[in-house]
Image: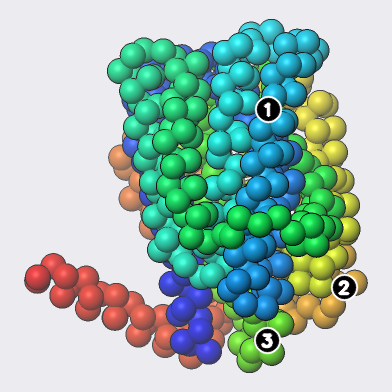
Amino acid sequence: MRGELAALLGRSGTYALSDILKQAINFLLLPLYTAYLTTADYGALSIALAAAAVLEVIYGLGLRSAVGRLYFDQRDEDRVRAFAGTLAIFLAVVGAGLSALLLAVGPGLWPLLGLDEVSFSPYIVLVLLTVPLNNLGLSLVLPLYYVRGQALRYAAFSLFSFAVVTGVTLLFVVGLGQGAAGALWGRWIAALIVLVPTLAILRRAARPVFERAQLRAALAFSLPLVPHLISAWALNFSDRIILGHFVSLGDVGLYAVGYQFGLLVSVVITGANNAWTPWYFKVSTGGGGAPVGRFVTYYVMLTVALGVGAAALAREAVTIMTAASYHAAWTIVPVVVLGYVLNGLAARFLDVLLLHKRTGVVPLTTIAAGAANIAFNLVAIPRLGILGAAYGTVFGYAVRLALTAFYAARTAPLPFEWRRIGRVIALGVLVTAPGMWLDTGSVWLNVPLKLAIVGLFPLLLAATGTLDRAERRALVEGWRQVRGRLAAGIRR
């Protein structure tokens, strides 16, 4: 069990590390971006990127999830390559066709959304040119890497793409002073550059054939998930569109920056999920003996710990990393973090539904959650502004968690350690409250004090017996090994 847990954590760490590194670089660049982009620029850019996010769902048609599940149904490597080739051809044709259509009708449809401050050209035109170029990498290359457990290759491709986007964006925003439009020009040029290695990877991983049976099976799995993915978009991005109707672009920019800090929790959870989900499918379909319930408890501990740390240090992180005009964004960070913690917990129930191929049920959960989120935003944003949008995120994810858990429990037995999970969550709440509201008036004094409070969480897990003796001993041994390796590295 320890060996399998170590392997799972190793892959999770690799996936998460690549995403954390990207997020860390974004954090380090925030002082630069906030110096060269006004809050209104940031607001316009965030609305354009929200449009890009929903288009990525539509262009991808949920096939990323189909790769993650149907890969394990292929008999041999030749069938895998035929499967990948079929999807590659389909995605390329769909992407080109949709962009051509939307470029033709978009100038008449975009003004109907009432977002006059964000013009169709160049903002949305650049989005429509960029999304189909990224589609093969997002929907096919990265999923193939994680279902094969090739975490290093996944991280390398992801980091390369990010480095190109960041470099070209900095050139346009900082070097050429092109503002929000420059950031979108940079993304389009970066997508052209990344397309070259994407096609090279697919040439090796896919066979240029088009098998209708393969496509039908993939679409039968993925299309029921499209409403789910669009509703997930509503949970993550629709608030920017709604905010654009009720508050200034400056406030939208403020919200976008605060949301970016809250995303740190989501980044780590996504990294863990990229390793967890294929492992869970493999163990569940292959009759492995790993204790899934205990592993779920460890996952909850990690998720709650991330939430505690991010919520407690929100004020200090925003103050240190952004220009003064953005400091008020800290107030939404703990709320957004809570939403992503709830979403991370829902992922374990979602695994059960996907394992049993109940993709028809999954959209019911996210459609309800997305609708709840939008309805809440329409009521709360006019009254509470950007804080209302943050509360809408929590409300939507809470609805999703409740419904996903309900359907999962009706689908199969859930061997979770409910009592231990309840204690973990209760202890997280107990530590978060004082950590979040402590304020001495000095950022640099707040940081060590809050780190000390956050450090109480693992101590309380041990002191209350939430971690048993064997687990505490394993943690001590693991810490000694890590410390020994660090010491050896310093000596070298």
Name the mark nearer the viewer: 1 or 3: 1
For marks 1 and 3, the one nearer the N-term is 1
Residue depicted at x 38% and y 19%: 173
* 434 with respect to 228 (left or right): left
For marks 3 and 2, the one nearer the N-term is 3
The crowd level at tag 2 (other Cα within 10 Å; few <14, some 14-19, many 20+) is few
For marks 1 and 2, the one nearer the N-term is 1
x then y, percent, for residue 249? 60, 14
Q: Could you say which is closer to the camera, residue 335 or residue 196?
A: 196
Image quarter of residue 207: bottom right
Q: CA distance from mark 1 to mark 2?
A: 39 Å
Name the mark nearer the viewer: 1 or 2: 1
Give the residue furthest to the left. 491
Q: CA distance from mark 1 to mark 3?
A: 42 Å
Q: Residue under circle 3? A: 286
Q: Residue under circle 1? A: 99
Residue depicted at x 71% and y 74%: 73
Amino acid found under the numbered disc labelled 3: Gly
Looking at the rendered image, the quarter that the C terminus falls into is: bottom left
CB atoms of marks 3 and 2 within 8 Å: no
Q: Is residue 374 above or below residue 81?
A: above
The crowd level at tag 1 (other Cα within 10 Å; few <14, some 14-19, many 20+) is many
Amino acid found under the numbered disc labelled 1: Ser
Residue depicted at x 64% and y 41%: 92
Q: Could you say which is closer to the camera, residue 180 or residue 300?
A: 180
x then y, percent, for residue 487? 17, 73
* 158 with respect to 78 (left or right): left
Q: Which mark is residue 411?
A: 2
Q: Could you say which is closer to the camera, residue 43 or residue 325?
A: 43
Amino acid found under the numbered disc labelled 2: Thr
Name the mark nearer the viewer: 3 or 2: 3
Q: Is residue 49 visible?
A: yes
